[in-house]
Structure formats: structure tokens, C-alpha cells
Amino acid sequence: QDPFPAQMVVALEGASSEACSFFGLLLLSTDVLHPPQAIEPARPLRLLLARMLARSWLEVGVWLSGSGHQDAWLMMALEARLVRAYISRAFGHNEAMYHLASERRALCDSPSATTEALVPTTDELQRWGGALHPEQLWSEFRMRKAPWVLHMIERQLGRHEHGARVFELMLARLA
């Protein structure tokens, strides 16, 4: 049990010592902190590894009936959901919300927003010879849009009496 009800950590530039503690307050010198250049390069790699791990889990563990290009958006949405959970645990809730906002901004600013459907149309499939390569199917736009579609479904179900439970059961059935 911690003897203090709250713990504050504060970094001060030009502090006289590396660290001092006072009844739940920890004062650090900024000299002991890592510079942003040391931390920031690791974040994209960690997110990429989380995305690839989530994708591999989903490819092995999730069975979607007739899983083809029509169901790929659901795999993308579930992958993003796992990555968002990882970001929240590894980097904190604020970073997860920042990531969500930046994904939304990138989705809205995307030039593909008006030309690319979440589920490829017959015309798009015919243009590519009847099928899409996974790199075409898992486009950046689709990977950003799919989680928002799943989120909208979750919100709509949540408005009904047992909607949240139905959504949980649906996800549990997929995994």
C-alpha cells in the first residue's frame, strides 16, 4: 500500500540535483530524462510490430465464413481495435486518443475518401483482373476507415437495451 494518496512527478530544468522526493512529490532534473529524439523513433516501429502481430493473430484465430474481399474490412477493423488496445496499455490513454484523432484526421484528408470503397466494387475488381492483391485490398484508406465503421456499428448497437452485450457476443464469436 502506498502511504501517499497521490504521486506527482515533475521535471525541472536547471534543478540542483538529479532527483528529490517530498511527501508524494518527485522532482527530477530534465538532465535525467530521455530526449524526444531517443523515444520518438521507437514508436512507429512498436506500432508496426503491434499491427503485424494483431494481423497474424487474426489470420490464424479468426474464422470468417467465406472470408474474401467482402470480409477483409472486418479483419482490418479488428486489427485496429487490438492495436488501439496496445497503444492504450503501452503508451497510455492520452496517446491512444491522440492516435485515434490523427487517424481520423488522416482519413478525412485522404484523397481516396471519395474514390475508394471499403469493400471493393465489381468494377474495381474487374480493373485489377478479377481479384485484388493483399496490398491493394489492405490499402491505407481501407485500414483507416474499417475501424470507424465498426465503431459506428458499436455505437448504434449501444443505443439499444442489450446492444452492448450483442456487440460483445459478436466479437467473441469472431475470435
Image (cartoon, rainbow, N blue to C red):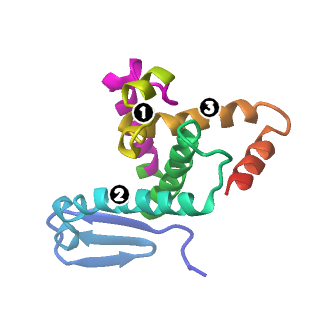
Q: Residue at x 35, y 32 (%)?
A: 106
Q: Earlier in the sequence, mark 1 or mark 3?
A: 1
Question: Does 103 lie within the magenta span?
Answer: yes
Residue 122: percent from the left, percent from the top? 50, 23
Q: Earlier in the sequence, mark 2 or mark 1?
A: 2
**Which amino acid, mark 3?**
Met
* Depicted 175 relative to depicted 5: above or below: above
Disc 2/disc 3 C-alpha distance (Å) = 25 Å
Look at the image and tell me whether residue 60 can be seen.
Answer: yes
Relative side of 147 to 139, left or right: right
Residue with the mark numbered 1: 104
Q: Quadrant of residue 167?
A: top right
* Depicted 103 relative to depicted 174: above or below: above
Q: Which mark is residue 152?
A: 3
Q: Which residues are magenta?
A: 96-121
Disc 2/disc 1 C-alpha distance (Å) = 18 Å
Q: Secondary structure at mark 3?
A: helix
Relative side of 128 to 36, left or right: right
Q: Nearer the viewer, mark 2 or mark 1?
A: 2
Residue with the mark numbered 2: 48
Disc 1/disc 3 C-alpha distance (Å) = 13 Å
Q: Earlier in the sequence, mark 2 or mark 3?
A: 2
